[in-house]
Image (tube, coloured by chain):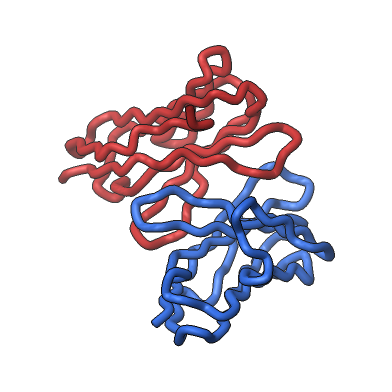
Chain colours: A blue, B red
Amino acid sequence: GAVVSQHPSRVICKSGTSVKIECRSLDFQATTMFWYRQFPKQSLMLMATSNEGSKATYEQGVEKDKFLINHASLTLSTLTVTSAHPEDSSFYICSARVERGNTIYFGEGSWLTVV
Amino acid sequence: QKEVEQDPGPLSVPEGAIVSLNCTYSNSAFQYFMWYRQYSRKGPELLMYTYSSGNKEDGRFTAQVDKSSKYISLFIRDSQPSDSATYLCAMREGGSEKLVFGKGTKLTVNP
């Protein structure tokens, strides 16, 4: 299957700092990428949908100024958690939809711990 | 009523058993149906993808979609300990890119 890579897989940052997570589609082009958040023993919660070259569409209740999403190319989207707080600690997962396709593949996820 | 209902389990079976996982949904506009496997602390892995009603088989896995009953299933034959994971159903409407997930069923296959 197609490969979606996330980096870093784990990150610890201090409260008040910003952290960037990258999501790359390694062997296909993805016009649309998605960012999810998952709490322990819970399902995935969609945060935002990003389309290459345009602004991301955020789900209700997700602060766009706090979770900055950039989708600068067909193979890369980034999520920046700004002014992170301990309650932002979570598992963040990206996914990518194959260009002109219906299949969606997920990255391995990134564990964020804010101390 | 949630859009997608999935029994969270946990489900525990002996090695070699046939496993049946199910989801029900309420939105008749869903057309694309997927099953993902998620190991602990990892991202979901696409297992099966089905469009509209019908069956699809891939190795030990069979996915079934019954749109008239708004019910989808995943069967795992000859289950292995390595199948122990959380299984998530997901679906989306034809004109939408947004996936709606079930809560996931935690499966343990005991050797």
- Image height of A109 relative to B74, above or below: below
Q: From this viewpoint, which residue is outermost toward the right?
A: A53
Residue at image coords 34%, 52%: A41
Q: Is residue B47 left or right of residue B97?
A: left
Q: Is residue A30 visible?
A: no
Q: How many discs mark residues in the rendered view?
A: 0
Residue B15 placed where, x, y %?
20, 39
Q: From this viewpoint, which residue is outermost toward the top?
A: B68
- Image height of A6 relative to B42, above or below: below
Q: Is residue A47 left or right of residue B37?
A: right
Residue B17 is drawn in which quadrant?
Answer: top left
Residue B37 placed where, x, y %?
42, 47
Q: Is residue B51 visible?
A: yes
- Image height of A71 relative to B72, above or below: below
Q: Is residue A48 left or right of residue B6?
A: right
Residue A18 placed where, x, y %?
57, 83
Picture quarter with the C terminus of chain A: bottom left
Residue at image coords 68%, 58%: A33
Residue at image coords 68%, 56%: A58
Most foreground residue, A34 or A102: A34
Most foreground residue, B101 or A18: A18
Q: Is residue A58 left or right of residue A36?
A: right
- Image height of B23 relative to A9, above or below: above
Residue at image coords 77%, 65%: A74
Most foreground residue, A79 or A2: A79
Residue B26 placed where, x, y %?
54, 23
